[in-house]
Image (cartoon, rainbow, N blue to C red):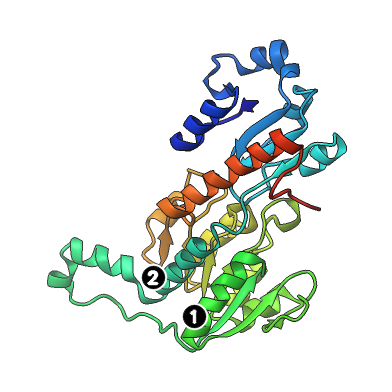
Amino acid sequence: MLQLAPLPPALETQLQREFDVHPLWREAAPQDFLAAHGSEFGLLLTHATAGADAALMDRLPQLRAICSLGVGCDALDLAAARSRGIVVSNTPDVLNDCVADLAVGLMIDVARGLTAADRHVRRGDWISKGPPPLGTRVSGKRLGFLGMGRIGQTVARRCTGFDMEIRYHTPAPMAESRWTHEASLVALADWADFLVVACSGGPATHHLVSTEVLQALGPQSFLINIARGSVVDEEALVHALQTRQLGGAALDVFEQEPQVPPALLAMDNVVLLPHIASGTAETRRAMADLVLRNVRRYVESGRLETEVRG
């Protein structure tokens, strides 16, 4: 099997112990290697950021399965995989709790100004300038979700403990949902005090959070993105924050990671994290274990434990 990009060391060690794995990312000339040996591989190992595009699949004519570390599939060309009869697995569910925990933390941070206040103390401003500006209460506020999949639902359940009213926007209402569906994203943003982006990335959701949505949120509300940077029009977000058309933003993802717009770095009403929502030892271990189970099952039976459908 072919390994496209680095994976957690413990996972790499176990895969190499059990299987014949070739790390393409260590090749000095990957394209030359694929031209000479691409037909030798039937299974590809990758992760959600590296993905696998149609051009790569073309270089692997015997490819029959892709096992990816991570829940996101926007970097995986699923249409190309389906057309070639290639099955794909990801690592859903095992990261829901840690991503939800981080989303709640970001919400509290941006509303109450926790990390901004920390910087205020470290700079000596508490002594020289007095207390930082007042924050915004979280409890009892209106919480909107763009997307209400496994992660969104996990965040929503946590936020019921804050006595928040919850609504969500998806293309169609969810069957038997306990929360109110809003058919219009702009209307949801206009209603919400907090808007959590918790949908998939990819062309269908590209820049869904637009200038119009940000203006609807308004200067007293906050955007939290734990999904994909591509869902938010980053240029429009910077403008909304600079002109105080938006109260603040808490971002774990960006359009061109690891590059972050310099304008965001200068703002105290923005919380910036380096895509760490699933970044706990427990979750990363569970993700690696699930990749390993998918590989083992495919080698043994030709099937995947968590095959991506649709």
Query: Label 1: few (<14), some or many (≥20) within 10 Å?
Result: some
Label 2 crowd (10 A; few <14 / some 14-19 / many >=20): many
Question: Which quarter of the rendered picture does the N terminus lie within?
Answer: top right
Q: Nearer the viewer, mark 2 or mark 1?
A: 2
Q: Is residue 202 above or below residue 213?
A: above
- The residue beneath circle 1 is 220
Residue 5 lies in quadrant? top right
In-image side of 279 versus 145 (left or right): left
Residue 199 position, x and y percent, is 66, 62
Based on the displayed image, in which of its 4 quarters is residue 269 positioned?
A: bottom left
Tell me the residue at 51%/35% (across/down).
7
Tell which residue pokes out farthest to the front in this image.
300
> Measured from the top left, where is residue 82 in percent x and y?
83, 41
Q: Which of the pair 200/110 is nearer the observer?
A: 200
Q: Disc 2 on helix, strand or loop? A: helix
Residue under numbered circle 2: 109
The answer to which of marks 2 and 1 sits earlier in the sequence is: 2
- Which quadrant of the structure image shows residue 28? top right
Which residue is at a point 50% across and 33% down the rendered structure image? 14
- The amino acid beneath tag 1 is Gln
What amino acid type is highlighted by mark number 2? Asp
The structure residue drawn at horizontal position 32% and vertical position 65%, both measured from the top left corner, is 115
How far apart, in angstroms, are the residues tagged by discs 2 and 1?
15 Å
Q: Nearer the viewer, residue 169 or 268?
A: 169
